[in-house]
Image (cartoon, helix red, strand yellow):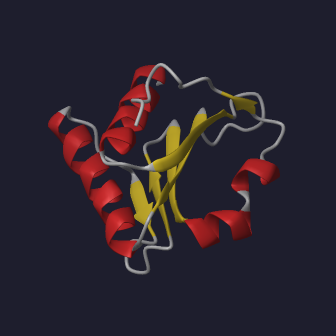
Amino acid sequence: MEQLMENIVKILDDKKGIDIKVLDIRELTTMADYFVICTGTSSPHIKALSDELDEKLSEKGISFLSKEGFQTANWILMDYDNVIVHIFSEETREFYSIENLWSDAKDVDISDLIKEN
């Protein structure tokens, strides 16, 4: 699970996902272990982030259980069982403020996974 989360972070970072955050939600819910949250710069970029995740993880034999929001591309949710990925537009991320809704979750330090720009 942790390896999957790390792979997701690296893929999103390589595709220029913005403000990537990981929340450890294991102590708060049984729905998943981690939320990976990031922002895309536009609808095409958000879709490209989602497509890249699907492609790169499929190469490793990992498929999402469900994907929602691809048509509108303001908020794409990809469920990888124990890791749930949220890819937002900036406005939608601010509006829904998932980090605040899940403020009791632990922030995971991913600084060693992110390339310096």
Residue at 59%, 40% (x, y): give it. 21
20 over 107 or under it: above or below: below
Q: Residue 42 versus residue 61: which sits nearer the camera?
A: 42
Residue most toward the left?
59
Compare residues 66 and 10 and report the one nearer the observer.
10
Can you give x and y, in whole percent of width and height, for residue 82 in the image? 51, 36
Task: Point out the residue furthest to the front here.
Answer: 117
| Residue 10 percent coordinates (x, y) | 36, 33
* Left or right: where 68 falls relative to 10: right
Say which quadrant the C terminus sits in. top left
Residue depicted at x 34% and y 65%: 45
Residue 39 horizontal/vertical position (percent): 51, 57
Q: Nearer the viewer, residue 101 or 21?
A: 21
The answer to which image quadrant residue 78 occupies is bottom left
Residue 31 drawn at (x, y percent): 63, 43
Residue drawn at x 26%, y 39% is 57
